[in-house]
Image (tube, helix red, strand yellow):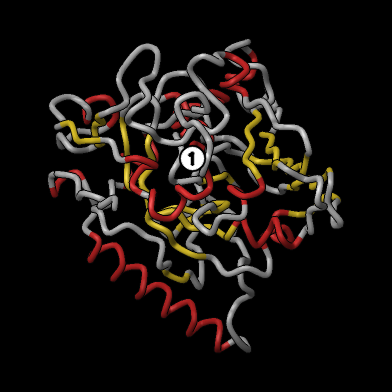
Amino acid sequence: MLIRKPAVIRPSAITPRETYFNRRELLRAAMLAGGAAFGGPALSAALPDGKRARLDDIKSSRFSTDEELNSYTDVTTYNNYYEFGTSKSDPFRNAQDFEARPWTIRVSGHAEKTGVFDLEDFIRPYDLEERIYRLRCVERWSMVIPWVGVSLAEIVKRHQPLSNAKYVRFETLLDPKQMPGQRYRTLDWPYVEGLTIAEATHPLAILAVGVYGEVLPNQNGAPIRLVVPWKYGFKGIKGIVSMEFTEKRPIGSWERAAPNEYGFYANVNPNVDHPRWSQARERRIGASGGTGFQSLLGASMQDTLMFNGYGEQVAHLYDGLDLRRNF
């Protein structure tokens, strides 16, 4: 049995959960009251536009961890998003003018219901849920983030994949004018990632459209991104514009760039080292009381948990699979 251990984080490095949730509930109550005055509550999964716009009618989730949250600053200023630069601070600096609306997503491949969908139609009619998940990166750092999103499983099922659909392939927007990192051959653009159908229909996987009760900031993958909490962060593709049901296993961008370092499954496994460092231990961003790179200096190390602590829920997906060879 795997037990998630709470991280040791200084109070100055986090937003207290009580403060955050109390503020959110007050705002939510006010919005619901306002909606009733105009003839009823807002439509489920209706997304507001604008930076730091509040998301309405968010439900809590039974899948959330009880670990302490990272601060909003940690979550939004220390990011991997190579479309906007390779430094952890580049996405925050370079993504501020990115236009994330209007937005469409193309659904294609082996499925009954395909086509091009506006973002709101793509995620309706599903409820927005807040799920507090751990994010674990190959670079040996982690965060605890209050994502807001919709169940990927429900969206996949709605499009009715055919029996020969074995995988789901996702693709990021290709727009070098807005995404300066795409002007360089750092990766083979556009960014591609994928999951097996079993992974994509597991209840833990979500498509996130918000964080901390607000719409996703550009640097975090606005307007929609994948969150798979038992996998390394590079699987969490951002700025999704395409979802394809395919019989052939997708080759992700990082797998294509360095297949000996970034495998398709990318399950958090402390027993399999990255070729250049151990994955057995990790540092929690913000644990030293600083922000950005400074937050790693002096931060205490903690054991990395198999499947990022979600082994009880997901280990059965890989019965019979050699997780050393299929990393």
Residue 26 higher or lower than 106, as above or below: below
Residue 51 higher or lower than 58, as above or below: above
Q: Residue at x 45, y 47 (%)?
A: 315
- Residue 135: horizontal and vertical position, in percent? 39, 41
Front position in the image: 82 or 273: 273
Q: Residues within 10 Å of mark 1 (few under 14, many from 20)?
A: many
Element type where label 1 sits in the image = helix
- Residue 288: horizontal and vertical position, in percent? 15, 34
To which residue does mark 1 refer? 220
Q: Which residue is drawn at 58% across and 60% down?
A: 151
- Residue 45: horizontal and vertical position, in percent? 61, 66
Direction from residue 212 to residue 316 in the image, left or right = right
Q: Residue at x 27, y 25 (%)?
A: 293
The amino acid type found where label 1 is placed reads: Asn
Q: In which quarter of the image is residue 136?
A: top left
Q: Quadrant of residue 159?
A: bottom right
Q: Which residue is drawn at 43% across and 44% down?
A: 230
